[in-house]
Image (spheres, rainbow, N blue to C red):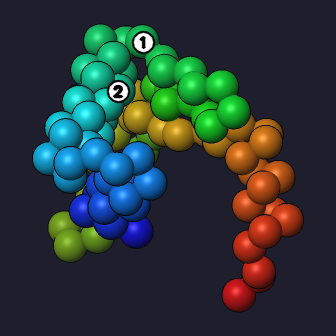
Amino acid sequence: MTKADLVAKISEKLGMEKGDVQATVESFMSEVKNSLEGGDNVYLRGFGSFIIKTRAEKTGRNISKNTTIKIPAHNIPAFKPAKVFVEGVKTNVEVK
């Protein structure tokens, strides 16, 4: 499902203009992004959490030059689904 598909479905369910729904979805994503960039996690009960994970420093390899490089510690955004969300997917989605 793409963002356009999501906007279309929400617009259809709520009977709202697609432009209004598009603005709402864009605003939601912008606020989640701004919150994570500001160092704050976002918790949505029953859905999941957008969190910041810290990756430790590690040694990597540049295979084209056959040298080792040091990858510094860094933060990455991550999503952790709620237990209810995980159970719903487990019970309702067929294994491929």
Q: Distance between the residues labelled 2 and 1?
A: 9 Å
Q: Is 37 on the left or on the right of 94, as rendered?
A: left
Disc 1 is placed on an element classified as loop
Q: Where is residue 48 in the image (x, y as percent from the top left)?
A: 61, 35
Q: Which residue is label 1 attached to?
A: 40
Where is 93 relative to 7, above or below? below
Q: Callout 2 environment at 10 Å: few (<14), some (14 to 19), or many (20+)?
A: some
**Front residue of this view, candidates 41 and 90:** 90
Disc 2 is placed on an element classified as helix
Dividing the picture into quarters, in which one does residue 77 lie? Answer: top left
Q: In which quarter of the image is the N terminus?
A: bottom left
- Residue 53 shows in this picture: no
At x 69%, y 33%, the residue is 46
Name the residue type under label 1: Asp
Name the residue type under label 2: Val
**Front residue of this view, candidates 54 and 28:** 28
At x 82%, y 52%, the residue is 87
Closer to the observer: label 2 or label 1? 2
Q: In which quarter of the image is the C terminus?
A: bottom right
Where is 13 relative to 77, above or below? below
Q: Where is residue 91 in the image (x, y as percent from the top left)?
A: 85, 65
Labels 2 and 1 touching (C-beta < 8 A): no
At x 31%, y 61%, the residue is 8
- Residue 25 shows in this picture: yes
Q: Which residue is label 2 attached to?
A: 32
Q: Position of residue 51 (x, y in %)?
A: 50, 27
Q: Is 11 on the left or on the right of 94, as rendered?
A: left
